[in-house]
Amino acid sequence: MSAAPTVAPEKAHIAREFAQKAPLIACRFDPKGRFVFATAEDRSILRWDLESGKAASFNGHDSWVFALGFHPDGQTLLTGGGDGRLVWWPAADESPKPVRSIDAHQGWIRSIALSPDGRTVATCGNDRIVRLWSFDDGRKLMELPGHERPVYRATFAPDGKTLVTADLRGLVIEWDYRPGKEVRRLDAAKLSKYDAGQGVDYGGVRDVSFSADGKRLACSGLIEASNPLGAISNPAVLLFDWESGKETLLQRPKEDVKGVAWGVRFHPAGFVIAVSGGNGGGFLWFWKPDQVNEFTKLNLGNTGRDLDLHPDGLRVATAHHDGKVRLTALFPKPA
């Protein structure tokens, strides 16, 4: 039996693609690493088996689906869309049908997160309210008010006790979610801009990720937005020391590449991965946590809109405007 590949971001290459007709929005691997899922602008949810390539579709939303989440055991997929509905699905069924559907938010659901113990579902979106639900029966447990702008992302910390939410204005809130208590606020406003001329907030924290040890938090988004409606900006990642809550580094590309860092992941090996998309095309960026500029990057060939890291740490999935999920291998091509 051959040895498992060693992670080598400098040798990253696109190893496989799965195609869909409509532009893609979001993508996720299931916790067991069997499938990759993606959502598309034709309102569909797609699933591809990573071994066979076999595809399946999930149909149950009346709008685009922006959020994907999984129970830690990998058996249940949760989806949230622009219709404000939160839907439970059997993740691996050959012909999946909804198990439960609830009206969770007024307007778009932007993000879904499940607690490490699998008991609590956190959702957030354009109505500016974070809500907690019982995974087992869909009961609403509580609401967490505090954001004054649409909430783009929710995630649970590795300790299983902490929920983090982030919004359009760059406000990051730490919650002790079991009593529903706000603990503190972190300032990621560098990733947001208010344009007085056009009267809009632009940017915000588009994704968040904890390091494996829980000591750092990465927030992705944009900087130097000069024309919000024209989408002129540069991708960036803001790093925080979690214990102190203080910003430690603003990471950005060496070159002037226009776009937004739509997704970010801390790799278990310690480096940061982000996907960008926009006028400058689509790239995977790789940063060391103590360096401003990337140590390597990969041109993905089309604007990226989301990413996820496979549980094995060797593959990255990215969702693209051209309707493709690209799987990038973080190791050298086989000889």
Image: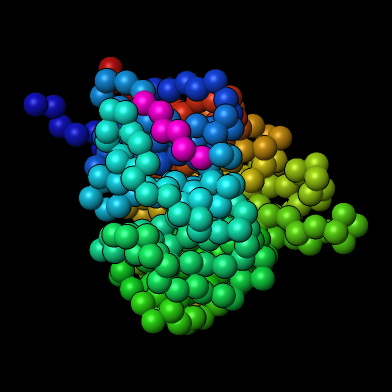
Percent from the top left, x then y, of residue 327? 40, 30
Percent from the top left, x then y, of residue 177? 40, 75
Image side of residue 198 versus residue 255, left or right: right
Question: In the rendered view, would you say 156 is above or below 237?
Answer: below
Residue segment shown in magenta: 56-61
Q: How many marks?
A: 0
Colouring of the image: rainbow
- Residue drawn at x 67%, y 37% as measured from the top left: 278
Percent from the top left, x then y, of residue 219? 53, 59
Tell me if residue 221 is in the magenta stretch: no
Q: Quadrant of the N terminus?
A: top left
Image side of residue 56 versus residue 261, left or right: left
Residue positioned most to the left: 1
Question: In the rendered view, would you say 117 is above or below 65?
Answer: below
Looking at the rendering, which quadrant does residue 9 occupy?
Answer: top left
- Residue drawn at x 59%, y 76% as measured from the top left: 146
222 and 85: which one is in front?
85
Residue positioned most to the top: 335
Q: Quadrant of the C terminus?
A: top left
Image side of residue 187 versus residue 35, left or right: right
Tell me if residue 57 is in the magenta stretch: yes
- Residue drawn at x 42%, y 50% as measured from the top left: 101
Percent from the top left, x then y, of residue 144? 51, 74
Q: Is residue 287 visible?
A: no
24 and 263: which one is in front?
24
Looking at the rendering, which quadrant does residue 127 occupy?
Answer: bottom right
- Residue drawn at x 29%, y 64% as measured from the top left: 119
Question: In the rendered view, would you say 263 is above or below 150?
Answer: above
